[in-house]
Every structure is written in C-alpha cells, then in structure tokens.
C-alpha cells in the first residue's frame, strides 16, 4: 500500500489545442516541489497528477507549497493498492484515521475495470459497513459528508482517496507571459500582483525607493513581501529596487506641490515601461482601486496612465478596501504590509494633492522637471532574486 497525493487541475480542463502547454507548466511546478522535499515519484494521467510518497517526513511541510500552486483545483490524499477488497478496506481505514475531526462520511466507488467482481453499489455498501464497524462514532451522510472516500478500481490497481485541500485555481505560473508590477509597501499592490500571478503571469516587481530618506527597514519589508509572493511562483521572483531619489527631489523642487503624486506615478510608469520593454514584458500592474485615495480618481488615473505606452493592469480597480484586506490576509502579505515602514510616496506626498488633475497642466509641470533633469531619467537599479524555499 503506497501513500499518494492526487492533484486535480482547474480551468485547464477547458483548454483544447494548447492544453498540453498548460499541463507541462503545472507538472513542472508540482515536480519542483516534490523534488525539493524529496517526496517521491510524480506522474500524470488524463487530467490528473499523481505523487507517490516515499518519504513522509516532509509531506506536511510540502503541502504548504502544493496548496499555493496556481492551476490546481484540489488535492487528494490517498492510497494506491491492489485490486483486493480487503486491502481497499485497510486503506479506507487508514485514511479515516488520518483525516481528523470527521463525524460523517460517504463512500463513492467507481469501477474503470468492470471485471472487478464487486460492482460500485456493492463497494459503497460493503466498505460503508466496514467503516461503521471500525468507527462506531461515525455516521453516513450521502449529501454533505465531512469526508468522502473515493474508491477507483483500475486495471492493475485501486485508488482510495479523500480530498484534503481546496486550492486556489487559476492558471499555471508563467503560462500567460511576463508583466512588471509596481510594488509599494502597502496592502494593495501585493494583492494586485498576486491576482495577475493567479491568471498565469510571471511577475517582476519594481519598487521605487528614495534613499537616504527611506532605509533598510523598508527594503527588508519589500523583500519579505516578495518572499511571500514567491511561494506562489515556481523558481522565485526577481525584485527590482529602483533608486528614485534624484527624480523625486526634482519633482519636489520644480513642480507645483499639488502635482507631486501624479508626477511621481508618471515617472514610475515611464521607468516601468523602459524596464518592461527590455525584459519583453507586456504590461504593468498597479494596486489602484478607483476612488480609494486622491491619486486614484478617474481624472488622476487618466493623467497617470497617459505616461504609459504599455497596458496598465489594475486588477483591484473595483475592489473595496475591506475586500482587498481580506484577500491580503488569505495570501499572507497582510501582516507585512501593515508594518510601520516609510514609503517614498508618504515622505514626499503633498498636503493638498490635486484630486482632479488636467492632463495639460500635469504635462506642463512635468516639462519643468524633465528640463531640470536634461530630459534624462536618472535612476539606478539593484536586483535580487528571491526564492520560495
Ligand atoms: P498600495 O497599498 O499598493 O501602496 P495605495 O492605496 O497606497 O496602494 P498609492 O500609494 O496611491 O495607493 O499607490 C498606487 C499604486 O502605485 C500602488 O498600488 C502601486 O502599484 C504604485 N506605487 C506606489 N508607490 C510605489 C512605490 N514606492 N514603488 C512602486 N510602486 C508604487
Ligand atoms: Mg501606497
């Protein structure tokens, strides 16, 4: 009797011609984790990935990684055993012991191999009776059981399994292509980044900082945010830390105070466009939610957006703050985001920001800054690759 994990994939099942492309990405991701924890052999048959566990010591820890794989709908724990009813009973018993806190159960048997002498209805009945005999505290509930024991009779073996994790769904990491992401230390942009990762984007986070006004504490916070996001990636995420001090100072010095935020965002987008183009990335993510703060009115979003040639993706545009916070908690970024940490935008933000910017005025102010900078954007990049393990 061998312990196995079974992974069911989500939306990929709707894909037709290019399904294999998505399956390969997913398989690679599952394999990567299985190898890292030295768990055992993986294989794939018709819409499902299997992992035969040779080394159980790391299984629990590995589940924290498996459950974060985009593209997986659910994970089942089970046993692979002979096509022998007594062995099937033992496997079901072991599963019931392992799945703690169960009060009700149901057996769902399926025979792929119709030559198996007991039919599905009989397996349900017989195995159900066996479980009831061994666990007198349990009862059968065929509608909403705490535990559904699935029995599959195949040609050369049988599977006995039960669902242990409902996963996130989405599409495999990297299957959609590459985008850069404007990642601040706040609550919103990590969530926005994660949502695009969930739809298959490989992300390159860009954080703009203004040393010496911002310090190591902020850098450390950003790195930990990226570390949390990297748990959902395959091989990690490369963070770009961009020294923005000269530009930020020029904005403060040469443009009207009330345009500071709009201009900072425009310069960030211009730099993001340069970096994205060099990396063959096809868009830019931001954490804007309509109306949340002064810089996120329709007028100001228009003025900011105008600086970008590449599409700007704002997956949170229709979210309330509470919805974003709930998601941040689920992802794991929330406790890091709410840590005290001085962001360049807070330091330089104006007392009375423009809430309804006009593009002509914004560009006039921007021209003053650009002229002072001799029409070159002075910024420096430091990169750091942050891995999930
Ligand atoms: P967040 O919680 O993501 O910081 P926010 O509600 O504080 O968002 P703003 O500060 O107006 O909103 O920022 C809007 C968006 O601009 C952010 O979501 C992020 O995408 C980007 N951004 C802001 N500051 C930075 C920064 N220092 N580096 C990179 N991107 C930034
Ligand atoms: Mg912010």
Image (spheres, rainbow, N blue to C red):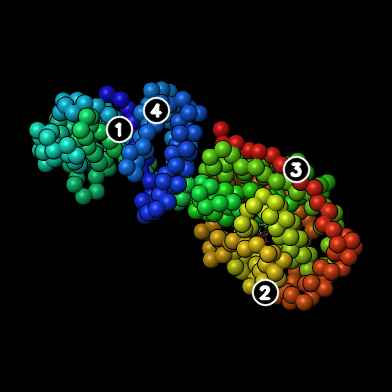
Cβ atoms at labels 3 and 1 below 8 Å apart: no
**Where is residue 45, by image quadrant?**
top left
**Residue 39 x, y percent position in the rendering:** 43, 26
Determine which residue is flagged by label 4: 41
Disc 2 residue crowd, few under 14, some 14–19, many 20+, Cα 10 Å: some
Disc 1 residue crowd, few under 14, some 14–19, many 20+, Cα 10 Å: many
**Residue 75 x, y percent position in the rendering:** 37, 40
Question: Is the CB of mark 1 within 8 Å of ligand 1?
Answer: no
Label 1 or label 4, whichever comes before in sequence order: 4
Judge whether residue 164 can be spotted in this image: no
Report the Cα–Cα distance between label 2 and label 3: 33 Å
**Which marked residue is nearer to the observer: mark 3 or mark 1?**
3
Determine which residue is flagged by label 2: 299
**Residue 114 x, y percent position in the rendering:** 13, 38
The disc at residue 282 is none
On screen, 315 above or below 75? Answer: below
């Amino acid at each position: 009797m061998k312990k196995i994990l079974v992974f069911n994939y989500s939306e990929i099942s709707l894909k037709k011609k290019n399904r294999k492309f998505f399956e390969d990405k997913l398989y690679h991701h599952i394999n990567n984790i299985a190898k890292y924890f030295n768990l055992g052999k993986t294989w794939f048959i018709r819409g499902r990935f299997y992992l035969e566990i040779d080394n159980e010591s790391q299984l629990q820890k590995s589940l924290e990684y498996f459950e974060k794989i985009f593209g997986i709908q659910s994970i089942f724990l089970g046993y692979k055993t002979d096509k022998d009813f007594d062995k099937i009973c033992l496997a079901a018993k072991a599963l019931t012991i392992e799945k703690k806190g169960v009060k009700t159960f149901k057996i769902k048997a399926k025979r792929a191999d119709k030559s198996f002498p007991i039919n599905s209805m009989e397996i349900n009945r017989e195995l159900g009776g066996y479980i009831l005999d061994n666990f007198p505290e349990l009862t059968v509930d065929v509608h909403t059981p705490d535990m559904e024991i699935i029995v599959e009779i195949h040609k050369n073996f049988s599977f006995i399994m039960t669902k242990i994790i409902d996963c996130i769904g989405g599409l495999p990491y990297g299957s959609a292509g590459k985008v850069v992401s404007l990642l601040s230390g706040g609550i919103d942009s990590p969530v926005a980044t994660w949502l695009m990762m969930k739809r298959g984007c490989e992300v390159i986070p860009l954080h703009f900082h203004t040393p010496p006004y911002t310090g190591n504490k902020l850098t450390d916070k950003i790195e930990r945010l990226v570390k949390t996001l990297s748990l959902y990636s395959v091989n990690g995420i490369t963070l770009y830390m961009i020294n923005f001090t000269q530009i930020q100072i020029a904005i403060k010095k040469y443009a009207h105070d009330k345009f500071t935020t709009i201009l900072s965002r425009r310069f960030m987008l211009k730099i993001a466009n340069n970096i994205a183009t060099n990396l063959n990335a096809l868009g830019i993510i931001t954490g804007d939610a309509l109306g949340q703060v002064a810089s996120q009115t329709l007028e100001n979003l228009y003025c900011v957006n105008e600086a970008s040639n590449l599409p700007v993706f704002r997956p949170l545009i229709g979210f309330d703050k509470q919805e974003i916070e709930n998601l941040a908690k689920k992802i794991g970024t929330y406790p890091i985001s709410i840590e005290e940490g001085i962001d360049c935008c807070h330091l330089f933000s104006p007392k009375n920001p423009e809430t309804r910017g006009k593009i002509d005025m914004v560009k006039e102010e921007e021209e003053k800054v650009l002229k002072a900078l001799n029409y070159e954007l002075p910024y420096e990049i430091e990169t750091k690759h942050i891995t999930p393990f």
